[in-house]
Amino acid sequence: MKNIKWYLIVAIVLIIGTFVVLRFITPEDTWICQNGNWVKHGNPTSSQPTSGCGNEISKNINEPNNKFVNDDFEIIVPDKWVKSESQIPGVTLMVVNVGENNNDENIKKINFKSYYAITYTTTEKSLNDYLPEYESEIKSAVSNVIIGNISDGSVNNYPAKFLELNINQQNIDFKTFVALIKGEGNDVWILSFNTTTKQWSNYETLIPEILNSFKIKK
């Protein structure tokens, strides 16, 4: 447990330092779920969400391909991946591949491990209209980010936008897959899978599996 806690501290520092998650996936003006309650982040134009941001139901998350389930969604947790217990503002769920091995010395220095994260926001815009705003936030946060492979799709019959982000920080090439998923109302669920360019090919099968397991509760 001590090693996991230390890793999470390092992971949080990395997130803040590289903007891989928090700045990319958390809009400035939105509602975030904290301790079971919706809390304003900035000055959201939309009203407070009516859907719950309740407690986790499934606690035994270290079983092979078990599911994380809460009041709003469910998603698989791959074998030997671990859910972060840290309360990071804007992040509803963060799951880390703590058993990942890296030979790159720069990666070893910061003890980076691949992970995926989920956050939530609301917008009255369509995904087509929201995407430029999202891209603008990314570019204003990290000047050298490269956004590519933007495509349309769906996740369990919900419309989605998929894009890939590439960024170099601390002499490491990071690669992030992002899915913007539009719910039935104004809700947008943002799934971010974060790894390194060197590790990307190892997850090309797992990323769709995780994404397709994401189910929004009505």
Image (cartoon, rainbow, N blue to C red):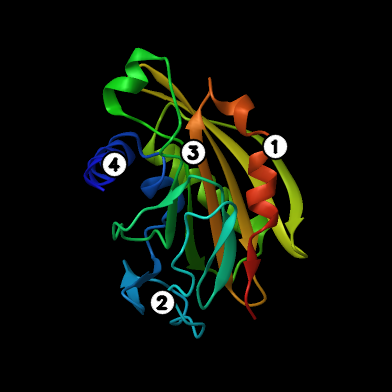
Question: Is residue 145 placed above or below 87 in the rendered structure?
Answer: above
Badge 4: residue crowd in 10 Å (few <14, some 14–19, many ≥20)? few
Instruction: Give residue 123's position: percent from left, percent from top.
Output: 54, 69
Task: Assign a secondary structure to mark 3.
Answer: strand
Q: Earlier in the sequence, mark 4 or mark 3?
A: 4
Q: Secondary structure at mark 2?
A: loop
Task: Indicate which label's residue lies in the foreground, 2 or 3.
Answer: 2
Q: Say which label, 2 or 3, has the lower sequence index.
A: 2
The label nearer to you, 1 versus 4, is: 1
Amino acid type, label 4: Ile
Residue of label 2: 55
- Front in this rendered view, residue 32 or 41: 32
Residue at the image point whose x is 44% and y is 74% from the top: 45
Give the image location of residue 180, x and y in percent. Answer: 61, 55
Q: Compared to 206, does 211 lie above or below? A: below
Q: Nearer the viewer, residue 47 or 210?
A: 210
Query: Farthest residue toward the front?
Result: 63
Measured Cα–Cα span from mark 2 to mark 4? 26 Å
Q: Residue at 44% across / 59% down in the picture?
A: 93
Q: What separation in Å lies between label 4 and label 3 (alpha carbons)?
A: 14 Å
Of the numbered discs 1 and 2, the one sitting upstream in the chain is 2
Q: Mark 2: which amino acid?
A: Asn
Residue 177 as seen in the image, left or right of residue 42: right
Mark pair 2, 3: CA separation: 25 Å
Alpha carbon separation for disc pair 1 and 4: 28 Å
